[in-house]
Amino acid sequence: MTEWLGPEEWQAVRLSLKVSATAVAASLPLGLLCAFALARGRFPGRHLLNGLVHLPLILPPVVTGYLLLLAFSRQGPVGALLEPWGLSVAFRWTGAALAAAIMAFPLMVRPMRLAFEAVDPGLEQAAATLGASKLRVFATVTLPLALPGVVAGAILAFAKAMGEFGATITFVSNIPGETRTIPTAIYAFLQMPGGEPAALRLVAVSVALAMAALLASEWLSRRIARRVAA
């Protein structure tokens, strides 16, 4: 691939993989918490939480990116708090990871929630009667049984993060080597005279990575499901 792709194209691919992996790893704990709360929780504000989780699917990505820019710029409420610690994310690859994590979050939570809802509560109650704490029941019973959905959600979120464009370019711009991921690189190449071949190569890479992620999600989910059933 390094011979087929040029230096700028390969740089965009590597950055996309880095951004997507960081986005999934950073949002996975919160995704598990939200999915479990929506699946089993009965508390005031549950519908509000469900709406907030799925809001990135409804809002235009540019709106999400603009809101992130307002919040995390140096003059923004969050950015002003992070600036003294040197933790600025606006116009940096970490900001691209944040935008990708937010846009991919609904696709992560949905399969996890369905997996938690499919776990038989009777098995959890049986473990609790044997003296296991709620945390131990979750770690040893609920989570292993829901693992296929957790894996599927994580891989789908990774694929979505790889293709994120609107929120990313609005929040962190299109800086080569810093925030230029595959989608923003394709956009940049299409604006250049003679850049179409490079854009087509990146489109091919993007399609291949997305298909690989979907196939891996299906294969891992089935394999884990068979192990759990056994």
Image: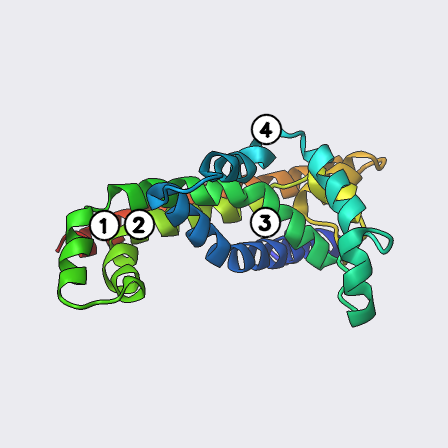
Q: Secondary structure at mark 3?
A: helix
Within 10 Å of disc 4 (Cα), the crowding (few <14, some 14-19, many 20+) is: few
> What's the amino acid at mark 2?
Pro
Number of the front mark, 1 or 4: 4
Identified at 37% across, 52% down, the residue is 151
Mark before the other along the chain sequence, 1 or 2: 2
Identified at 25% across, 64% down, the residue is 140
- Residue identified by numbered label 4: 58
Q: Secondary structure at mark 4?
A: helix
- Residue identified by numbered label 2: 148
Measure the alpha-carbon separation of dots 3 and 4.
15 Å
Mark before the other along the chain sequence, 1 or 3: 3
In percent of width and height, residue 125 lies at 17, 54
Number of the front mark, 4 or 2: 4
Measure the alpha-carbon separation of dots 1 and 3.
26 Å
- Residue 42 in view in this figure: yes
In percent of width and height, residue 61 lies at 67, 34
Does residue 44 sit above or below 88 in this rendering?
above
Q: Secondary structure at mark 1?
A: helix
Could you tell whether 33 is left or right of 25 in the image?
left
Could you tell whether 27 is left or right of 126 in the image?
right
Identified at 29% across, 51% down, the residue is 146
Does residue 208 sit above or below 95 in this rendering?
above
- Residue identified by numbered label 1: 225
> What's the amino acid at mark 4?
Ile
In percent of width and height, residue 134 lies at 29, 62
- Residue 205 in view in this figure: no
Mark before the other along the chain sequence, 3 or 2: 3
Could you tell whether 4 is left or right of 230 in the image?
right
Q: Are marks 1 and 2 in contact (CB under 8 Å)?
A: yes
